[in-house]
Image (cartoon, rainbow, N blue to C red):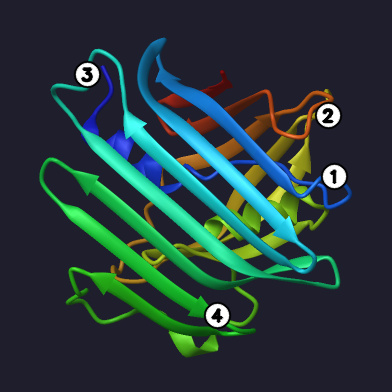
């Protein structure tokens, strides 16, 4: 049985896709999400590129036998520009809803983080100097840059900052390690997420994604 805490942590990092800018400009894919063999949700993703401008959107929703007990839905939208083969976030919005709460995160960027807003308003004082975050990206854009050839991507998701670093397994799969992890609004540095693994084939999008937590693995499989 999976816990709500583990599911919540997983969904924070539930932003996965692969891109190569030499392909067509519009993509879409759907996945089913499961853990310990039990389906818990559906995920859909779209990406549009027009010259040097991109927009990507992710939507997810609970599904399966646990839906009556734990309902959730979320959407993640990132827009930005492509400069020197680097995808740079300009605006990011995250919406997340469960039975007990609704959370909205909004961020704006140029080369620095310009603005971070959250609803409900965060009452804690930031442990990070947000004005000094240079060339940080939202999580979606970080995945784009890593999987488009970058070795690492500095990331902010509204609650945390961390660096995604790319490694490759012997079979050619892409493994993302999480380093330099810091909670913005808390003193501790606890992070149960260990790595994210992309199983790739000849298609543009990964065939399967594995999200490795300390005690559990979440699997995304293309439908």
Residue 101 versus residue 10: which sits nearer the camera? Answer: 101
Label 1 secondary element: loop
Quarter of the view holding residue 195? top right
Comparing labels 3 and 2, the label whose residue is closer to the camera: 3
| Residue bearing mark 2 | 172
Horizontal arrangement in the rendering, residue 24 relative to residue 223 (left or right) = right
- Label 2 sits on a secondary structure element that is loop
- Counting residues from the start of the chain, the first of labels 2 and 1 encountered is 1
| Label 3 environment density (alpha carbons within 10 Å; few <14, some 14–19, many ≥20) | some
Q: Residue shown at 51%/32% (left/top)?
A: 212
Q: Is residue 86 left or right of residue 137?
A: right
Which corner quadrant of the image does residue 6 belong to?
top left
Q: Is residue 65 above or below residue 133?
A: above
Which tag, 4 or 3, sits closer to the chain's start?
Answer: 3
Q: What residue would you read off at disc 3? A: 66
Work out which quarter of the rendered image holds the N terminus and state it: top left
Gap between marks 2 and 4 measured at Cα: 33 Å
Callout 3 touching callout 2 (CB < 8 Å):
no
Tell me if I can see residue 146 in this picture: yes
Q: Residue at x 29, y 16 (%)?
A: 64
Identify the secondary structure beneath mark 3.
Answer: loop
Single out the residue that lies furthest toward the left: 100
Q: Which residue is mark 1?
A: 23
Q: Nearer the viewer, residue 173 or 98?
A: 98
First-in-chain label (2 vs 4): 4
Residue 152 image offset from top left, x and y in percent:
72, 59
Q: Which residue is mark 4?
A: 109
**Residue 16 at what x, y percent from top left?**
58, 41
């Amino acid at each position: 049985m999976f816990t709500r805490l583990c599911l919540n942590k997983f969904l924070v990092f539930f932003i996965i896709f692969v891109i190569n800018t030499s392909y067509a400009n519009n993509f879409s894919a759907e996945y089913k999400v499961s853990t310990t063999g039990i389906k818990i949700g559906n995920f859909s993703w779209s990406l549009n590129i027009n010259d040097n401008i991109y927009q990507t959107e992710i939507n997810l929703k609970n599904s399966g036998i646990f839906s009556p007990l734990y309902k959730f839905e979320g959407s993640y939208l990132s827009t930005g520009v492509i400069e020197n083969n680097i995808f740079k976030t300009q605006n990011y919005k995250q919406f997340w809803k469960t039975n007990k709460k609704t959370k909205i995160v909004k961020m704006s960027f140029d080369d620095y983080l310009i603005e971070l807003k959250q609803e409900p308003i965060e009452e804690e004082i930031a442990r990070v100097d947000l004005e000094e975050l240079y060339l940080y990206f939202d999580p979606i854009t970080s995945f784009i840059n890593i999987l488009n050839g970058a070795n690492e991507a500095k990331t902010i998701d509204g609650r945390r900052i961390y660096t995604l670093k790319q490694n490759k397994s012997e079979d050619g799969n892409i493994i993302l390690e999480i380093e330099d992890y810091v909670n913005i609004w808390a003193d501790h540095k606890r992070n149960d997420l260990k790595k994210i693994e992309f199983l790739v084939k000849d298609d543009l999008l990964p065939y399967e994604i594995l999200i490795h937590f300390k005690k559990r693995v979440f699997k995304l499989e293309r439908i």
